[in-house]
Amino acid sequence: MSDAVTIYHNPRCGKSRDTLKLIEDRGIVPVVVEYLKTPPSVAELTRILALLGKRPAEITRKKDAAEAGIDLATLDDAALIRALVAHPIAIERPIVVKGDRAALGRPPESVLAIL
């Protein structure tokens, strides 16, 4: 697996900016994916979820999902992944991936374990 660090980033989000700064302050130049402009594919998001050890509902921003018309109560995991890819604003952020490990940057310091 690659040693590259990738951050799925929303520059308008304070936690995402803080996490990116934390990574850069350690001398790491991450691959920055502005996931609202370049959403992950179904396969990418499925891989990220596996690395996180989470189900799609656990990385779903409930308010943003509701505003996007995503009904968490009626969707199975596969359908929710497709909905998140179609409406990436509903994906919790930031997510940092390094090799075969991933962490959600909430709080930002939680990504230190995978760096």
Image: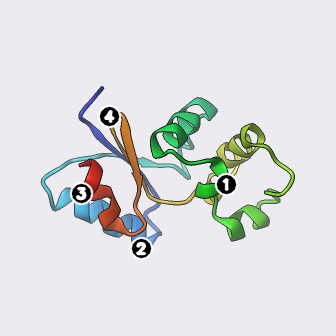
Q: Which residue is drawn at 58% across and 36% down?
A: 46
Mark closer to the observer (3, 4) = 4
Q: Mark 4 points at which residue?
A: 99
Q: Name the residue under label 2.
A: 14
Residue type beneath disc 2: Gly
Q: Position of residue 96 (x, y in %)?
A: 38, 50
Residue type beneath disc 3: Ile
Query: What is the residue that sits farthest to the left in this orientation?
Result: 27
Mark identifier at residue 37: none
Q: Mark 3 points at which residue?
A: 23
Going from the N terminus, do you reach mark 4 or mark 2 first? 2
Q: Do the residues labelled 2 and 3 touch (CB within 8 Å)?
A: no
Left or right: residue 96 versus residue 23 is right
Q: Do the residues labelled 4 and 2 touch (CB within 8 Å)?
A: no
Q: Mark 1 points at which residue?
A: 57
Residue type beneath disc 4: Gly
Q: Residue at x 27, y 54 (%)?
A: 113
Query: What is the residue that sits farthest to the top in this orientation?
Result: 1
Q: Where is residue 7 in the image (x, y as percent from the top left)?
A: 38, 49
Left or right: residue 107 versus residue 29 is right
Which of these two is toward me, 61 or 37?
61
Going from the N terminus, do you reach mark 1 or mark 2 first? 2
Query: What is the residue that sits farthest to the right in this orientation?
Result: 74
Q: Where is residue 1 in the image (x, y as percent from the top left)?
A: 30, 26
